[in-house]
Amino acid sequence: DRNEAFLAGEYTGGMPSDIKELQRLNERDQKAEEKVNEIFEAYGNSISVSEYTLNYQDMLIQLYRDNPMTELQEEIFWEAVSYLGTTYLFNGLCGPGGSGIDCSGLVMNVYNNISEGDVNLPHSANTISQMGIEAEEPLQVGDIVTYDLDPSADKPTIDHCGIFVGYLNGEPMIIDASSGAFGEVCLRNMGLNGTKGDQGLAVPITIRRIYDENGDIAE
């Protein structure tokens, strides 16, 4: 077996492809662990508050490890991660670990920060649902998911949004500022874990993509 021979120092050819893949994954694990620790150390006062955040470190490492990302998507991923644990506040626009932020404020801040002001999203989930272009499958890290938190109403209303951050064991995950049971910026299933809005189950309405495949702002 080439892999065993390579590990034993008896194989003189190039590095076997599966060994290269293992090495790549180990390098991504290391990078993710360093980045997660850096963020948790910087914003630990907010991130460590909630019982929901206890497993975030392992989950984030796995998300980063298992989901291919461009350099731009990595920036979006880590910027969104830095807000985890920040308190929910209606109309809030604080930075990571600050006094509070709401769902559209989170999305707006993340994109404004990583683009250095070139992407100016509105402070409104409904208006954000009209920005960029409609995302095509497969979903990409950074796609914006918008929701109707009360689909039982006669007319659909987009009143929530979050940022897609990859698949975790096959489940699509988002980071969003939750006003419900979480009461903070959290990492959860794109279906909002089946949690309810005021009157009904949340339903994803649109998925928008702000950057095109070339990394340019989509129009």
Image: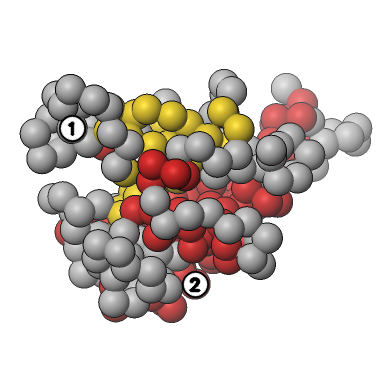
Q: Quadrant of the C terminus?
A: top right
Tell me which amino acid carries mark 2.
Answer: Glu
**Quarter holding residue 160:** top left
Tell me which amino acid carries mark 1.
Answer: Asp
Q: Nearer the viewer, mark 2 or mark 1?
A: 1
Report crowding for label 2: few under 14, some 14 to 19, many 20 or more residues within 10 A (C-alpha): few
**Quarter holding residue 153:** top left
Q: Locate residue 87 relative to residue 35 in the image: left or right.
A: left
- Residue at left offset 60%, top offset 39%: 132
Q: Position of residue 42 (x, y in %)?
A: 43, 78
- State the CA–CA distance, disc 2 to disc 1: 38 Å
- Please indicate, yes or no, whether residue 67 appears anywhere in the rendered image: no
Residue extending farthest front:
155
- Residue at left offset 25%, top offset 52%: 178
At mark 2, the secondary structure is helix
Residue extending farthest right:
13
Instruction: Decide which of 51, 160 is in the foreground and name it.
Output: 160
The disc at residue 63 is none
Instruction: Decide which of 79, 170 is in the foreground and name it.
Output: 79
- Residue at which label 1 appears: 150
Q: Position of residue 78 (x, y in %)?
A: 53, 58
Q: Are marks 2 and 1 in contact (CB under 8 Å)?
A: no
Q: Quadrant of the N terminus?
A: top right
Q: Position of residue 12 (x, y in %)?
A: 90, 35
- Residue at which label 2 appears: 38
- Residue at left offset 24%, top offset 25%: 155
Q: Locate residue 50 relative to residue 123 in the image: left or right.
A: left
Report crowding for label 1: few under 14, some 14 to 19, many 20 or more residues within 10 A (C-alpha): many
